[in-house]
Image: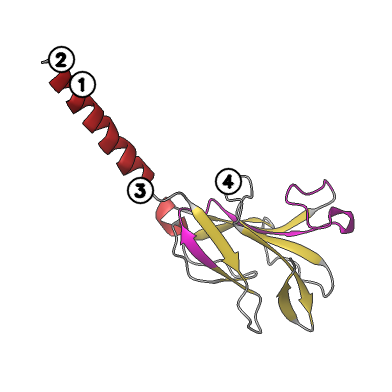
Amino acid sequence: MKSVGLIVTRYFLLMVMLSLSSCDEADVRISIPDEAVPRFAFKGNGYLDFFAVTELAPENNGSVTGTPKDRMIWQIFPETTENGTLPLSPIDYGKVPAGFVQRVPESGAPPPLVEGKLYRAGAPPIIHPRGFVHFMVKNGRLMVVE
């Protein structure tokens, strides 16, 4: 009888492990479509905790962790979990989509993006290691910077 119980227990643990391994891990990815408007597209799965655009200080050199001189210029949060769950429609810079609220700046539009400056846009890198993109404005269009 003990061996039957042991087999059932092992079978149960195996099924639990298989079901857990089949769960999708959150994987938010952000890209910049080649369009005239500053727009950010999202793919992957999971939840976008917030979306922010940060102007990176020249000495940052695109570091994920950033420097104290980096300046967040725009930040929006989903009002509900459902509103932040991927897939999401593209987000245009400075336009708060339905179901989101702006926290930075506290009021009004964010500053215009400046040609030649380096920016980072995306989800919190600590939560979504691939959920951000570095970019700059070149000839009036957003260009990804590797």
Mark 1–mark 2 distance (CA, rounded to whole Å): 6 Å
Mark 1–mark 4 distance (CA, rounded to whole Å): 39 Å
For marks 4 and 3 on the same chain, the one whose residue lies earlier in the sequence: 3
Q: Position of residue 110 (x, y in %)?
A: 71, 65
Mark 4–mark 3 distance (CA, rounded to whole Å): 20 Å
Q: Position of residue 138 (x, y in %)?
A: 79, 79
For marks 2 and 3 on the same chain, the one whose residue lies earlier in the sequence: 2
Q: What's the magenta region?
A: 42-68
Q: Which residue type carries mark 1?
A: Leu
Name the residue at the top extreme. 2
Q: Secondary structure at mark 4?
A: loop
Q: Secondary structure at mark 2?
A: helix
Q: Secondary structure at mark 1?
A: helix
Instruction: Give the residue drawn at x 53%, y 50%.
Output: 49
Q: Nearer the viewer, residue 45 or 40?
A: 45
The answer to which quarter of the image holds residue 29 is bottom right
- Residues at discs 1 and 2 in contact (Cβ within 8 Å): yes
Mark 1–mark 3 distance (CA, rounded to whole Å): 24 Å
- Residue 52 located within the stretch drawn in magenta: yes
Mark 2–mark 3 distance (CA, rounded to whole Å): 30 Å
Residue marked by disc 4: 127
Residue marked by disc 2: 2
Q: Is residue 69 above or below residue 88?
A: above
Residue 22, numbered circle: 3
Residue 6, numbered circle: 1
Q: Position of residue 91 (x, y in %)?
A: 56, 70
